[in-house]
Image (cartoon, grey):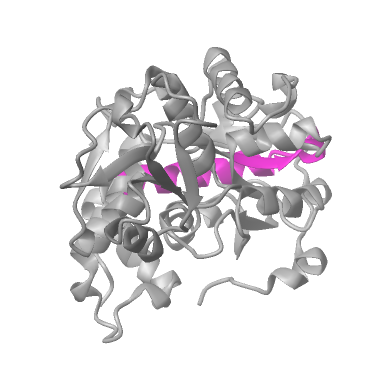
Amino acid sequence: MKFRTALGALAASALLLTGCAAAEGGDSGGGDSGAGEEAELVYVGAAAVPGSTQIGMWAVPDELGFFEEEGLTVTQELADGSTAAIQVVASGSADYTNAGVVSIMAAVNTGVPVQGYGAIAQNYPWVLAVGADSDIEDPEDFAGKTVGIISLASESNAFARAWMSENGLDPDSDVTFVPVGAGAPALAALDNGDIDALALYTEMYAALENGGAEFRYFDNPALFDEMPSIALTASADVINSDSDVLARAARAIYKGLLFSYANPEAAVRIGYEYYPEKLPESGDPEENIENDTRTFSAWIASVMPEEGDPLEWGDFGVIEPDVLQGVQDFAIASGNLEQEVDLEKVWTDKYVAQMNDFDRQEVLDLAESWAPED
């Protein structure tokens, strides 16, 4: 398995970015104009089990040499959720993570010195669903019902509560929320009648549908339009330093995500190489490739613009000020944030120009021509 080490050793093994900073004001180099100073980075994925996010943000850019082109060697670790990942980054034991934007705000609110700098999931991926034969037809039908959430600490809970509130229901009295986990346990709770609905993300629903589950989905209220879910996050001290390493890593990541969008099956096959535990027991990828590609495609759809030509999309990674304010409003309304925070401490556009400095057509051509090795 490529570049995976024990989380307990991170503090000793992580190379802090400030120790390998490039000269102030130096050319970003672009993805196609030569690597910067060599550096070793640790990426901590905010998931206890590797999924599509880790494939798109780490395995694909690593396999295709995008990190190497930037003079970077990136190793990966996994943490159990955004809060844990943020703590690892803030401690200096890892260099960056993909954290929930709401979690970044909550961390800043308590004085944790981290900052987001590149949106990843820009199309809000959480959706409310019922079984195909459910008698719940309209939002008002949820009154007196029970909704399954992943956990009380999950964004699943915040989303479900805000969804109810935006649709005229009191989440504290009209609806009951029950932690049921994700995946098979959540589906079992729905099938057994322990809950009436689920609040999960699109990738998880796709995985369950691969196994034969059938759902009926409800539209999200306008509150969630264009709301980013996760973002690249690092220590505020590193972001405020003269280092360009985070920008170079982000550039490699966005190249990997664009490749994954253009050829999701290739991304999944690369994922099998990095995470062989995702292969079926036979070890034959062809048994699962169709379903796994469908699941991955559901995730990448939350990352990239929903329509248009990739060559004409705007800059990757941007969170506009009004959108960030909307996320904060949601965080406060859902109880995940006690008070407003200084949004300049939550988010910076410092690296936007550098991390978009690459040839998109070149990446798209690579995705079209890519073939697995024999």
Residue 280 placement (x, y as % from top left): 29, 79
Q: Nearer the viewer, residue 49 or 241?
A: 49
Residue visible at 61% across and 47% down in the picture: 153
The answer to whether residue 102 is above or below residue 275 is above
Q: Is residue 52 left or right of residue 298?
A: right
Residue 243 lies in the magenta stretch: yes
**In terms of secondary structure, what is the magenta stretch mainly?**
helix
Q: Is residue 226 visible?
A: no
Give me the residue at 37% from left, 31% from top: 143
Most distant residue in the bottom direction = 282
Q: Which residues are magenta?
A: 232-261
Res. 278 image quadrant: bottom left
Q: Is residue 271 above or below residue 279?
A: above
On the rendered image, what quadrant is the C terminus found in? Answer: bottom left
As drawn, is 115 to the left or to the right of 174? right
Q: Is residue 116 left or right of residue 198?
A: right
| Foreground residue among 174 and 249 | 174
Residue 279 place in picture, x, y as percent: 33, 76
Residue that lies at the very extreme toward the top in this rendered image? 322
Instruction: State the residue at coordinates (18%, 62%).
Output: 212
Residue 27 coordinates in the image, percent (x, y): 65, 32
Q: Is residue 331 magenta?
A: no
Rendering quarter of residue 309: top left
Q: Tell me if I can see residue 182 in this picture.
A: yes
Q: Count the marks: how many? A: 0
Q: Nearer the viewer, residue 193 or 71?
A: 193
Q: Say whether residue 80 is left or right of residue 114.
A: left
Q: Position of residue 58 (x, y in %)?
A: 50, 56
Q: From what the image shows, is residue 342 above or below residue 106? A: above
- In this rendering, is residue 62 above or below 360? below
Name the residue: 52% across, 18% down.
323
